[in-house]
Image: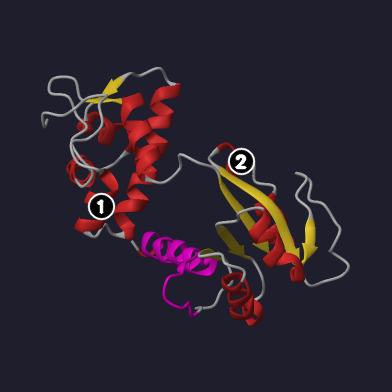
Amino acid sequence: MKRGTGGRRPKRDGAARARSAGISDLTAQRLSIYLRCLDDLQKAGLETISSQALADRFHLNSAQIRKDLAYFGEFGVRGVGYVVADLKRQLVQILGLTRNRRVVIVGAGNLGMALADYGGFNREGFSIVALFDNDPRKVGVVSRGGVPVMDIGRLPAVAKSEKVSIAVVAVPAGAAQKVLDLVVEAGIRAVLNFAPVRLAARAGITLKAVDLKIQLENLAFHLARAEGS
């Protein structure tokens, strides 16, 4: 175990070190996994844990854990391991979750409504402030969780007044590119796309895609291999 700073701040500024090292999306995704593991450990009352114990408990790779964390500083304490509460706090800061992120969803269909009512967002630093749609029959409706459906024409004004930083695209494939363009024009620079189509985003826009069909095909692949053996 590396000698570390325990509950103190890492020796180097995490954000600066991340930029210089060119942190990959996969590393960032693993940090989110570690954060959830630490949250479970904290709820279970554990105060410290080693990288090996963390890996064994959650079926992770201990060497990968140490490598990922080393990009941002030294967090372990020799002979003790990681202080769960301190490491969790550092990961929250590294992942940019120290302030609430306001989110809009474009598309008030079944998927959009389900996403708006997912309670985990509001507990984890994300607030869904509005749904948008171009269907007059949906405008004015409120989701079960209390999120209002607004006309798509109000997107720029709401994005500005509510300081929206993330948009979720939950529309049919044929409308997704147009929606992305509207979102970007509204000043939103981070987009999560659920439409089953590849979108083109200009420089400066962070675009992530969630393709449920690909995930189902991956599951089918593993089922086929298991059935074949």
How packed is label 2: few (under 14 Cα within 10 Å), some, or many (20 or more)? some
- Residue displayed at 25% across by 26% down: 8
Which is nearer the N-term, disc 1 or disc 2? 1
Q: Is residue 9 visible?
A: yes
Left or right of 156 in this view: 208: left
Position above or below: 97 against 226: above
- Residue displayed at 22% across by 50% down: 17
Q: Is residue 107 visible?
A: no
Residue under pointer 1: 18
Question: Residue 187 in magenta?
Answer: no
| Residue type at tag 1 | Ala
Q: Position of residue 164 (x, y in %)?
A: 60, 56
Cα–Cα span, label 1 and label 2: 27 Å
Position above or below: 94 against 175: above
Residue under pointer 2: 122
Query: For this rendering, which residue is in front, 140 or 216?
Result: 140
Label 2 sits on a secondary structure element that is helix
Left or right of 193 in this view: 203: left
- Residue displayed at 33% across by 35% down: 90
Position above or below: 126 against 7: below
Q: Position of residue 92 (x, y in %)?
A: 40, 38
Q: Position of residue 127 (x, y in %)?
A: 62, 46
Give the quarter of the figure containing the N terminus. Answer: top left
Q: Residue 74: which numbered mark, if any? A: none
Q: Position of residue 107 (x, y in %)?
A: 70, 66
Q: Which residues are magenta?
A: 200-227
Query: For this rendering, which residue is in front, 140 or 163?
Result: 163
Tell me the quarter of the picture where residue 49 sits. top left
Query: For this rendering, which residue is in front, 157 or 6?
Result: 157
